[in-house]
Image: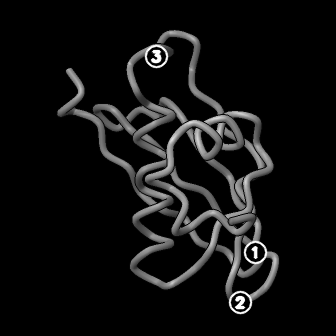
């Protein structure tokens, strides 16, 4: 079930990643790099084959968006998944650096 999934953020000086964990096992990740102090680029989203179709990538994106909103940052969509989600859903416009 979805409720067992946790997402944690690992921050490094140049970027970092959001990691989805289920029962302590890494099931997906979303990597990002800082463009500057105000903006980070989501460069790569990866979900384990066994966990596809369960909303893991969406949960990772929602976490990244929540982080951007809380810290007044913008997101540059590089990864094809994020590009598609940003194009499809206006709810992300406030954090989309191309808007």
State the image quarter where residue 70 is shown: bottom left
Q: Residue at x 57, y 26 (%)?
A: 47
Protein image colouring: one colour
Q: Earlier in the sequence, mark 1 or mark 3?
A: 1
* Front one among 83 and 88: 88
Q: Which mark is residue 51?
A: 3
- Placement of 51 over or under 74, stated as above or below: above
Give left or right: position of 2 versus 7: left
Give left or right: position of 28 versus 39: left
* Distance Cα–Cα, label 1 vs label 3: 28 Å
- Placement of 30 over or under 97, stated as above or below: above
* Front one among 25 and 5: 5
Give left or right: position of 75 versus 98: left
Q: Are marks 1 and 2 in contact (CB under 8 Å)?
A: yes
Q: How many marks?
A: 3
Of the two numbered discs 1 and 3 in the rendering, the one whose residue sits closer to the viewer: 1
Q: At numbered mark 2, what does the secondary structure look like: helix, strand or loop? A: loop
Q: Residue at x 55, y 60 (%)?
A: 93
Q: Which residue is mark 1?
A: 34
Q: Residue at x 68, y 86 (%)?
A: 38
* Distance Cα–Cα, label 3 vs label 2: 33 Å
* Distance Cα–Cα, label 1 vs label 2: 7 Å
Question: Dot 2, how many residues are within 10 Å of its Cα: few (below 14), some (14-19), or many (20+)?
Answer: few
Q: Which residue is mark 2?
A: 37
Q: Position of residue 49 (x, y in %)?
A: 58, 12
């Amino acid at each position: 079930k979805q409720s067992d999934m946790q997402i944690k953020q690992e921050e490094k000086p140049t970027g970092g990643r959001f990691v989805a964990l289920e029962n302590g096992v890494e099931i997906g990740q979303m990597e990002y790099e800082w463009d500057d102090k105000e903006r980070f680029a989501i460069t790569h989203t990866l979900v384990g084959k066994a966990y596809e179709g369960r909303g893991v990538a969406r949960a990772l994106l929602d976490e990244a968006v929540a982080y951007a909103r809380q810290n007044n940052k913008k997101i540059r969509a590089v990864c094809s998944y994020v590009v598609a989600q940003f194009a499809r859903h206006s709810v992300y416009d406030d954090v989309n650096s191309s808007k």
